[in-house]
Image (cartoon, rainbow, N blue to C red):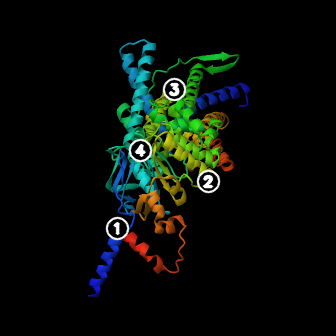
């Protein structure tokens, strides 16, 4: 049980899944910052993205395309489809409620989970499926330490995308527009910023990063309509990070990933989903606004 | 018989008011009318009427002030012109607003900005967690094709204190500097019309003087038309060309500054320089009655 090799291995696994949590959490934070809505359906959106990828890659495989061509074509198609999904959700579910209190919108996102899960079960059947992984499943040994190469590469890709998006958020003009809208919608409109355009943009970014996370996550677990359950861990990540802080999400994702992995190591897999919430509760008692969150924002 | 006389007296009063006051003076404006608001009615939450048939117009290159006390509907008028009432659950039920010859209805607030309307809101409303420079970037976001680097420099030239603090978080600026930033944000796209809601709010008297000097400088140098909303009547009279006084959602008095300044009632009730000693309500009744006839 306390074998150091196992401990290190599990820590590494935990940190790797933390990287993917960070990518998922980024989408939630983006939508929260721009629209003040906590998107509970983000896990379901991620699951949909994975199914899009499954569909496109299966079609290409049936044509007998080489590996590189499959990725080259199916990934952009998946991102486009996810962006469309995000636009549709924003345009038809969120925008009619614009200007209302965020709470009904949060309820809509909860309802959206069931809708998306049901739709996925109808379209792709509830049976577990295995999409083609982006990176081959190889185990490397460093000494007697086993490292899953698939997880390592997924982790690296997730972190790279996370960093690119967060740097754009801080540096680019669109990032400034999103942050300005987050501060004050009507003043942002008076500055010439298209507020509903910004909402659309943040949903698109969230859905595209979410679908990438889904593509990375699906081969590690298996793809079923309930893949979005991972979203539950991400809720704890985002709350711990402080809801509106991108750096906070990154730190919190590593903490939660590691704690989950340690919990399943010491207490068994069934405790994996409980322990993160215990940590979140403890930290929220000490720091009610999360690790890096803004103080004055509404709590859920 | 008594009623007949009373009504005659009433008629006489009405005629007196029309002939004797500044009210009849037709606006002698030969310049292009930039903004024309006619018979504007605005409701909040569909029940609270904030404006009751307000009409006014602004010619190109003027500074026009909208004076009035709290809750008179000054800010509502500006919000209606810039089309952000929907954010406050407000609605225009009747009336027309024409900006530069075309109606503003159906154009969203961000599109009006592109047409050359800028609005400095009450309480400054800067983006407090963005830096000074990012505030300006946000303001130029929609105008990226027309705004060039020297537009930023022009703003920093006009507001020297901002130039040295451009990388700082805007929330840490002093009140006057925040007001300057709010001005700078509005000026970055060289607007034709600048709406300003109480620029003197919460500033030290020295700062207020400076801000108003900047306003008249903007008006002269950049030929920007300015619609100013103020509670501070003395300031408004000092700096503007034409004044509208608004009360309970209606325009009650309007006129050129020099004419209004000589009007004893305006002096008494808005400028606080009247030297009459009123002892009871009866003494000021004539003024109330006059406003009623007008509105």
Query: Is the C-beta separation of discs 4 and 3 under 8 Å?
Result: no
Confirm whether residue A181 shows in the render: no
Name the spot of residue A285 as percent of width and height, x first: 67, 50
Q: Which mark is residue B19?
A: 1
Respond whether the residues carrying marks 1 and 2 are from the same subunit.
yes
Respond whether the residues carrying marks 1 and 3 are from the same subunit.
no
Badge 4: few (under 14), some or many (20 or more) residues near its Cα, within 10 Å?
many
Which comes before the other along the chain, label 4 or label 2? 4
Nearest the viewer among A243 and A281 is A243
Respond whether the residues carrying marks 4 and 2 are from the same subunit.
yes
Confirm whether residue A271 shows in the render: yes
Query: Is the C-beta separation of discs 1 and 2 under 8 Å?
Result: no
Q: CA distance from mark 4 to mark 1?
A: 41 Å
Q: Nearer the viewer, mark 4 or mark 3?
A: 4
Q: Which mark is residue A216?
A: 3
Q: Nearer the viewer, mark 1 or mark 2?
A: 1
Nearest the viewer among A240 and A263 is A240
Name the spot of residue B174 as percent of width and height, x first: 65, 47
Q: CA distance from mark 4 to mark 2?
A: 28 Å
Which comes before the other along the chain, label 4 or label 1? 1
Residue for badge 2: B203
Residue for badge 4: B109
Q: CA distance from mark 1 to mark 2?
A: 41 Å
Residue, x 50% and y 57% (percent of image)? B237
Is residue B295 shown left or right of residue B202? left
Q: Nearer the viewer, mark 4 or mark 2?
A: 2
Image position of B13 with respect to A297: above or below = below
């Amino acid at each position: 049980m306390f074998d150091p090799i196992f401990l290190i291995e599990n820590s590494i696994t935990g940190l790797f899944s933390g990287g993917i949590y960070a990518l998922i959490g980024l989408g939630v934070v983006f939508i929260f910052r721009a629209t003040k809505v906590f998107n509970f359906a983000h896990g379901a959106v991620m699951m949909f993205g994975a199914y899009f990828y499954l569909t496109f890659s299966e079609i290409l495989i049936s044509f007998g395309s080489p590996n590189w061509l499959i990725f080259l074509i199916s990934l952009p198609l998946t991102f486009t489809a996810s962006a469309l999904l995000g636009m549709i959700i924003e345009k038809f579910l969120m925008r009619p409620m614009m200007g209302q209190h965020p709470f009904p919108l949060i309820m809509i996102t909860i309802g959206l989970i069931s809708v998306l899960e049901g739709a996925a079960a109808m379209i792709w059947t509830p049976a577990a499926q295995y999409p083609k992984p982006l990176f081959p499943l190889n185990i490397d040994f460093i000494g007697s330490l086993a490292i899953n190469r698939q997880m390592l590469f997924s982790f690296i890709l997730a972190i790279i995308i996370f960093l690119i998006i967060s740097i754009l958020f801080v540096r680019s003009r669109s990032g400034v527009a999103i942050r300005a809208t987050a501060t004050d919608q009507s003043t942002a409109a008076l500055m010439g910023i298209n507020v509903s355009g910004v909402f659309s943009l943040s949903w698109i970014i969230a859905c595209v990063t979410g679908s990438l996370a889904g593509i990375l996550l699906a081969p590690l677990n298996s793809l079923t309509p309930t893949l979005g359950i991972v979203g539950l861990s991400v809720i704890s990540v985002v709350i711990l990070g402080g809801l509106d802080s991108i750096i906070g999400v990154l730190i919190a994702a590593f903490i939660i990933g590691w704690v989950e992995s340690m919990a399943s190591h010491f207490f068994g897999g069934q405790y994996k989903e409980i322990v993160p919430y215990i940590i979140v509760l403890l930290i929220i008692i000490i720091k009610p606004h999360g690790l890096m969150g803004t103080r004055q924002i509404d709590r859920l | 018989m008594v009623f007949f006389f009373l009504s005659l007296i009433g008629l006489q009063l009405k005629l007196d008011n029309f002939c004797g006051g500044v009210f009849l003076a037709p606006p002698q404006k030969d310049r292009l009318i930039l903004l024309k608001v006619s018979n504007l009615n605005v409701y909040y939450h569909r029940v609270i009427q904030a404006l009751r048939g307000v009409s006014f117009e602004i010619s190109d290159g003027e500074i026009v002030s909208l004076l009035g006390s709290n809750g008179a509907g000054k800010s509502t008028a500006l919000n209606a012109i810039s089309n952000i009432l929907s954010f406050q659950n407000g609605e225009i039920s009747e009336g027309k607003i024409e900006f530069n010859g075309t109606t503003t209805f159906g154009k969203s607030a961000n599109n009006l900005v592109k047409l050359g309307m800028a609005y400095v809101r009450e309480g400054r409303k800067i983006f407090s967690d963005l830096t000074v420079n990012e505030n300006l970037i946000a303001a130029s976001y929609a105008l990226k094709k027309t705004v060039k680097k020297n537009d930023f420099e022009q703003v920093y030239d006009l507001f020297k204190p901002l130039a040295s603090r451009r990388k700082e978080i805007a929330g840490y600026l002093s009140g006057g500097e925040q007001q300057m930033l709010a001005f700078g944000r509005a000026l970055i796209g060289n607007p034709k019309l600048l709406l300003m809601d109480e620029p003197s709010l919460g500033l030290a008297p020295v700062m207020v003087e400076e801000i108003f000097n900047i306003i008249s400088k903007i008006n002269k140098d950049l030929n920007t038309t300015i619609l100013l909303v103020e509670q501070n009547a003395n300031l408004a009279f000092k700096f503007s060309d034409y004044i509208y006084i608004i009360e309970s959602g209606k325009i009650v008095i309007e006129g050129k500054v020099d004419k209004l300044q000589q009007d004893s009632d305006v002096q008494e009730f808005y400028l606080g320089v009247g030297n009459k000693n009123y002892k009871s309500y009866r003494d000021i009744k004539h003024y109330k009655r006059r406003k009623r006839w007008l509105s």
